[in-house]
Amino acid sequence: MNKTDIPQKDIIDAFQFRHACKEFDSTKKLTDTDINFILKTAQLSPSSFGFEPWHFVVVQNKELRELLKPVAWGAPLKLDTASHFILGLTMKAPMTKWDSDYIMHMMKEVKQFPQEVIDMYSNFYKEFQERDFNLDTDKKLFDWASKQNYIALGNMMTAAALQGIDSCPIEGFHEEKAEQLLKDKFDIDTDKYGLSYMVAFGYRKEHPDHPKSRREIGELVTWKK
Ligand SMILES: Cc1cc2nc3c(=O)[nH]c(=O)nc-3n(C[C@H](O)[C@H](O)[C@H](O)COP(=O)(O)O)c2cc1C
């Protein structure tokens, strides 16, 4: 594939355009092509060892969106107005531990590794989890997998912005209550999946009321020459 040639200025303009959109214009909807494009950028996102420890639930059902409101204080206005509303689920320990059925499925069926590569990879992955990263609790494993899911989140929001589509990432929810709801009403196996974030997509109702505020670049970057 050829390298893409988007001018840097256009990309920075998209980063400036992206903001945490508080309210969307509920009359404007993304096309199927738009939302599938955004989801494609999640699919193509990098993940540790390439094990893709994520799942995305696109919540378009109005009743289900209503149910989310009481457990997600950061989301009500977005749930009412966003064109598309996504739950970023991350795999838990039974899925991501080095010897799980899922990891085996990834190596065998998805990556189609030959057996000797599977053996080598398994051993390496085990050492990485147990020795290098000390992922010795379910919580640590989940948080580690979640970190990867946030890469997909960033990519989806940037891709959207490059297309003039607005977004808002949302962590304003009660983790335990939200997961109970996902189990009871969304048919999600919460032994296997946890909720890392929500993200809304649509078109802004109004322009942001304040300019972007960021620290100076010199404050956040250290060069060692
Ligand atoms: C992981 C994460 C969680 C966030 N959660 C919420 C949220 O629950 N509700 C909300 O309105 N904004 C949320 N934000 C938006 C941030 O407040 C916002 O990105 C930050 O203030 C910078 O502003 P900007 O995105 O408009 O440049 C979240 C952002 C991130 C990255």
Image (tube, rainbow, N blue to C red):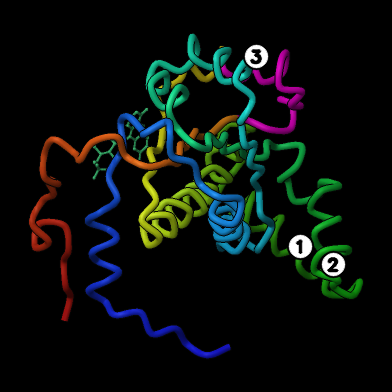
Q: Position of residue 64 (x, y in %)?
A: 62, 19
Amino acid type of the residue tagged 1 in the rendering: Asn
Could you say whether the residue bearing mark 2 is in a helix, strand or loop?
helix
Where is residue 207 shown, x and y percent of the image? 20, 40
Closer to the camera in the image, 173 or 49: 173
- Choose between 24 and 160: the one closer to the eye: 24
Task: Give, as a single range, the part of the protein colored magenta.
Answer: 178-194
Q: Are marks 1 and 2 in contact (CB under 8 Å)?
A: yes
The quarter of the picture showing ligand 1: top left
Label 2 within 8 A of ligand 1 by Cβ: no
Q: In the rendered structure, which amino acid carries the disc numbered 3?
A: Gln
Whether the magenta-drawn stretch holds residue 179 is answered as: yes
* Residue occupied by mark 2: 119
Residue on which disc 1 sits: 123
Residue displayed at 61% across by 30% down = 60
Q: Quadrant of the N terminus?
A: bottom right
Q: Report if residue 50 is visible in the image.
A: yes
Q: Is residue 39 magenta?
A: no
**Residue holding disc 3:** 180
Q: How far is the residue under mark 1 from the one under mark 3? A: 35 Å
- Pointer 2 with pointer 3, Cβ within 8 A: no
Q: Earlier in the sequence, mark 1 or mark 3?
A: 1
Q: Residue furthest bottom?
A: 2
- Asked whether the viewer can see residue 176, the reply is no
For the residues labelled 2 and 3, the Cα–Cα distance comes to 37 Å
Q: Is residue 58 left or right of residue 188?
A: left
Query: What residue is shown at x 22% (from left), y 74% (from top)?
Result: 9
- Label 3 CB sits under 8 Å from any ligand 1 atom: no
From this view, report whether residue 75 is shown above or below residue 165: above
Tell me which label, 2 or 3, sits earlier in the chain: 2
Q: Amino acid at mark 2?
A: Asp
